[in-house]
Image (cartoon, rainbow, N blue to C red):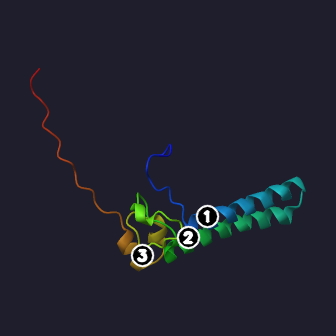
Amino acid sequence: MSAHGHVDLGHTVAGWTGTTLALLGFAGAGAAVCAAWAPGIRLGLGVVVVAGIVTWLLHLAGWGKPSGPRPEADWDWRTRDAGAHAGHADCLGCRVGGPRRALAATPRPRTAASLPAADGGA
């Protein structure tokens, strides 16, 4: 058991790809800062922006994961999310992904939990 308990931390193709691209972009921009090469800084930061877009597109294509825990059978990072094409509930990326996904991803109203009546006695 890990320090985070027995949960899936979202190791997905989208997550690994986006993290790798962002790391390369930040490293390139950092090297360009050290070399005082302004076009390299913009190029590196452009790669970071591309990393965000690629991660979002992979998420919409089913290579990401919805918010919250997943069944243990789906923990392998190469497992596609079959429900991604319809959109995930409470997912900003899915809401931005188009009207069909936005409808499925709209936040659901939460039901109020019934609370016991306050005790009037001492």
CB of mark 3 within 8 Å of CB of mark 1? no
Q: Disc count in the image?
A: 3
Taking 35 as reference, is 89 left or right?
A: left
CB of mark 1 within 8 Å of CB of mark 2? no
Disc 3 target residue = 82
The numbered disc on residue 56 is: 2
- Give the alpha-carbon distance from disc 3 to disc 1, as whole Å: 19 Å
Callout 2 secondary element: helix
Whichever of labels 3 and 1 marks the residue nearer the N terminus, that label is 1
Label 3 crowding class (10 Å Cα cut-off): few <14, some 14-19, many 20+?
few
Q: Residue at x 90, y 56 (%)?
A: 35
Q: Residue at x 79, y 67 (%)?
A: 43
Taking 73 as reference, is 40 left or right?
A: right
The numbered disc on residue 16 is: 1
Quarter occupied by residue 86: bottom left
Callout 3 secondary element: loop
Percent of width and height locating residue 65: 47, 66
Quarter occupied by residue 100: bottom left
| Front in this rendered view, residue 1 or 100 | 1
Callout 1 secondary element: helix
Residue 111 versus residue 64 in the image, above or below: above
> Mark 2 or mark 3: which is in front?
3
Check disc 2 and give the amino acid type.
Answer: Trp
Taking 110 as reference, is 53 left or right?
A: right
Whichever of labels 1 and 2 marks the residue nearer the N terminus, that label is 1
Percent of width and height locating residue 49: 67, 66
